Image: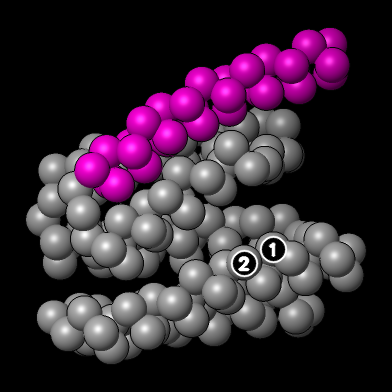
Amino acid sequence: MNIPNAITIFRGLLIPIYALLYDNPIYANIVFAVFFLGDFFDGYFARKLNQQTNFGKWADKIVDHALALVFLILSRNVWVLAFMTLSIIKGIATILLFKKYKVVMTDYFDKTPIVIFYLGMFFRYDWIFLLAFLGRVIDGLTYMWRFNKFKKSKS
């Protein structure tokens, strides 16, 4: 197991702790801050140490969205629901593309909506979740564009 994957697994272990502390925003935000820093560092070390793996790409997305799902259940916010719905659709598309082309496409457009979503989780303002939703829409459009570019390069 490499360092980035270990950090990602640690982040996954923080999710139930966050859920237990959700009603106490100070403690929940401390756990969330550790989670967020872990998200930054797992990606940083994966690139810096050249330890990017398909497991890491998948696990990172799963852990990110698992925390978001826990937040959706606990917050009952309509923009969180909209964001998660688009994220699930994109997740299904990612799985289908991986099955057919054996590729996981990720870039900064992919991470930007989740970072905005994280800010919403920290501050708990509806307008931040709206921005995250709009970011996910843009991310979905760029994902389709990148896929078409990828597909053309393979034909």
Gap between marks 2 and 1 measured at Cα: 6 Å
- Which residue matches tag 2? 40
Q: Position of residue 86 (x, y in %)?
A: 35, 35
Q: Is residue 129 left or right of residue 65?
A: left
- Say if 86 sits above or below 13 in the image: above
Q: Position of residue 104 (x, y in %)?
A: 68, 42
* Element carrying mark 1: helix
- Which residue matches tag 1? 43
Give the residue at x 15% y 66%.
Answer: 74
Quarter holding the N terminus is: bottom right
Give the residue at x 75% y 80%.
Answer: 3
Q: Which residues are magenta?
A: 127-155
Residue 85, visible in the rendered structure: no
**Few, some or many residues within 10 Å of mark 2 (<14, 14–19, 20+):** some
Which kind of residue does numbered mark 1 sit on? Gly
Question: Picture quarter containing residue 125?
Answer: bottom left
The foreground one among 131 and 49 is 131
Are the residues flagged by discs 2 and 1 in contact, CB closer than 8 Å?
yes
* Element carrying mark 2: helix
Q: Position of residue 50 (x, y in %)?
A: 88, 63
**Few, some or many residues within 10 Å of mark 1 (<14, 14–19, 20+):** many
Q: Is residue 92 left or right of residue 75?
A: right
Quarter holding the C terminus is: top right
Which kind of residue does numbered mark 2 sit on? Phe
Residue 82, visible in the rendered structure: yes
Q: Position of residue 91 (x, y in %)?
A: 46, 42
